[in-house]
Image: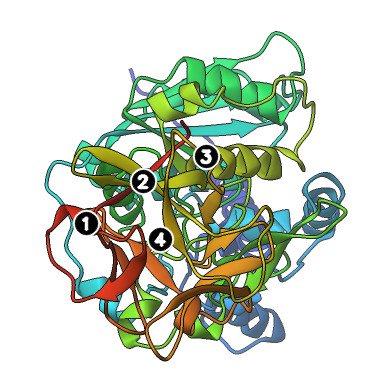
């Protein structure tokens, strides 16, 4: 049996449905016109008219495609994120968050670098990133830049060392996120250890042949790792630092770096110094490795066994700021300060100069290492053969070898010690050799034993 409802009931229901539909559209309009996430993701809707609010929304959508407007503050929450970022991290966290975990950056390498090839069997690397309360977006952008711009066979593992962070996002949320990333593991300290001991924890857990230390707020560029591993493959006692480009703390614009090397002052403060002009004469000089007196502490690569042989870091250091100079001096002490000896048939002869003390313009000669205390020579970062701190071995216009005051300009005082153990003088194109009269002279380079020189601490 059917039951007929009154006509006024239908009218009431129709009115309520109409009101609900109108209310729903008003709420949707308000949400879509003001929601930050809606605008941030670049979503849009068809605009029916040219009202001021529609113009504003259209402008916001267009600006999201322009990196220069990523720092645009639209509400109080944006202002809070920006101010909080500067207070805790000293950079614009609002821009960093909007960049996401990965972005395209310009290839800033020299053109000659782009055509260089490297060995197919390079050693694998353990990449160690130590952090404490790092911003979520910068930390993960560091990790993703490594994963996306590094050949898989070169990365043995990425080790994240959380030095007792207190930020909630770096706890369970980070743990769950890292589980989804390839070759990435997260270690946590039980208490605040400081950067140096934090890195030590990472190094002790590393398995790769080479240790690569990175800061937790950087982005690696294209083909960044092969040049570092190539140098270490050729000489495991080489410590290699990459060219460090710059990311603007306010805008996060990626900028290329001038060609510099590490130095320090008498207060033992690290500083960047221009590369001397005499080392940048030919186009190839701009892509060849540049010897540096010291290194930046945040980004470098070192053979894992050599790192252990050096004694690793000094664990008595609590914070960053001195570890880079300390380890630089240890590397220099073990690899640069040697007595120069000549291996000859039936005897060992040492390069020396006459007299009890070094004198300017004294001629170089050879002496039996067993009978006399030979002078200590060092082949330094400027490729000078230096003795007694202030004097360098120089080839005169008449191809005589004398010690002169060091001038740091290369030329007649610039030497190379190559794989064949020859001491090659760059300006003359000749090699140093011994004579039967226990003297030394410059001669056309060959493979004779009289041109074989090696460093020893004996």
**Is the residue under label 3 in contact with that under label 4 (CB below 8 Å)?**
no
Spatial distance from mark 1 to mark 4, Cα to Cα? 46 Å
In which image quadrant can residue 302 be found?
Answer: top left
In which image quadrant can residue 131 be found?
Answer: top right
For disc 2, the marked residue is 349
Q: Please state which of the two labelled residues, at mark 2 or mark 4, is closer to the viewer.
A: 2
Q: Which mark is residue 450?
A: 1
Spatial distance from mark 2 to mark 3, Cα to Cα? 10 Å
**Is the residue under label 2 in contact with that under label 1 (CB below 8 Å)?**
no
Q: Please state which of the two labelled residues, at mark 3 or mark 1, is closer to the viewer.
A: 3
Q: Please state which of the two labelled residues, at mark 1 or mark 4, is closer to the viewer.
A: 1
Q: Nearer the viewer, residue 458 or 70?
A: 458
Spatial distance from mark 4 to mark 3, Cα to Cα? 53 Å
Q: What's the residue at 18%, 43% (across, down)?
A: 345
Quick one: label 3, few (<14), some, or many (20+) residues within 10 Å?
Answer: few
> Mark 3 or mark 4, which is nearer the start of the sequence?
4
Q: Is residue 361 left or right of residue 204?
A: right
Quick one: label 2, few (<14), some, or many (20+) residues within 10 Å?
Answer: many
Q: Nearer the viewer, residue 324 or 372?
A: 372
Q: What's the residue at 32%, 40% (across, down)?
A: 348
On screen, 428 above or below 458? below
SS class, disc 2: strand
For disc 4, the marked residue is 221
Q: Which mark is residue 372?
A: 3
Q: Quadrant of the N terminus?
A: top left
Quick one: label 1, few (<14), some, or many (20+) residues within 10 Å?
Answer: some
Q: Is residue 309 left or right of residue 200?
A: left
**Image coordinates for residue 218, horizontal then vertical, percent:** 56, 52
**Is the residue under label 1 in contact with that under label 3 (CB below 8 Å)?**
no
């Amino acid at each position: 049996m059917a039951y007929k409802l009154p006509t006024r009931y239908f009218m009431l229901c129709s009115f309520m449905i109409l009101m609900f539909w109108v209310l729903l559209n008003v709420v949707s309009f308000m949400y879509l016109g003001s929601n930050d996430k809606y605008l941030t993701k670049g979503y849009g809707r068809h605009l029916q008219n040219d009202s001021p609010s529609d113009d504003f929304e259209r402008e916001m959508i267009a600006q999201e495609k322009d990196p220069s407007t990523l720092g645009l503050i639209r509400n109080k929450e944006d202002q809070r994120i920006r101010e909080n970022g500067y207070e805790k991290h000293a950079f614009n966290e609002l821009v960093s968050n909007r960049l996401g975990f990965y972005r395209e950056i310009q290839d800033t390498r020299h053109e000659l670098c782009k055509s260089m090839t490297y060995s197919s069997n390079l050693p694998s690397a353990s990449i160690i990133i130590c952090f404490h309360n790092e911003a979520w977006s910068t930390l993960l952008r560091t990790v993703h830049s490594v994963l996306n711009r590094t050949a898989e066979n070169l990365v043995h593992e990425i080790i994240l060392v959380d030095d007792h962070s207190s930020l909630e996002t770096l706890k369970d949320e980070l743990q769950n996120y890292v589980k989804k990333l390839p070759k990435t593991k997260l270690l946590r300290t039980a208490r605040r250890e400081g950067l140096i001991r934090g890195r030590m924890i990472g190094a002790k857990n590393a398995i790769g042949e080479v240790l690569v230390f990175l800061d937790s707020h950087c982005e690696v560029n294209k083909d960044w790792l092969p040049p570092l591993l190539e140098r270490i493959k050729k000489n495991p006692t080489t410590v290699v630092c990459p060219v460090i480009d710059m990311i603007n703390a306010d805008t996060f614009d990626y900028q290329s770096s001038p060609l510099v090397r590490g130095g320090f002052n008498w207060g033992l403060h690290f500083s960047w110094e221009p590369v001397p002009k005499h080392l940048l004469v030919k186009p190839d000089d701009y892509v060849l490795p540049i010897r540096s007196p010291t290194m930046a502490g945040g980004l470098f690569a070192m053979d894992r066994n050599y790192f252990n042989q050096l004694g690793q870091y000094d664990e008595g250091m609590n914070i960053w700021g001195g570890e880079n100079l300390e380890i630089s001096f240890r590397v220099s002490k073990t690899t640069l300060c040697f007595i120069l000896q000549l291996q000859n048939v039936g005897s060992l002869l040492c390069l020396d100069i006459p007299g009890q003390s070094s004198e300017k313009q004294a001629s170089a000669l050879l002496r039996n290492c067993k009978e006399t205390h030979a002078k200590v020579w060092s082949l330094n970062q400027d490729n000078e053969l230096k003795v007694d701190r202030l004097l360098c071995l120089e080839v005169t216009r008449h191809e005589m070898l004398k010690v002169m005051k060091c001038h740091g300009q290369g030329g007649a005082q610039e030497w190379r010690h190559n794989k064949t153990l020859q001491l090659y003088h760059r300006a003359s194109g000749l090699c140093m050799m011994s004579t039967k009269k226990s003297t030394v002279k410059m001669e056309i380079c060959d493979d004779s034993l009289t041109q074989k020189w090696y460093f020893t601490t004996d």
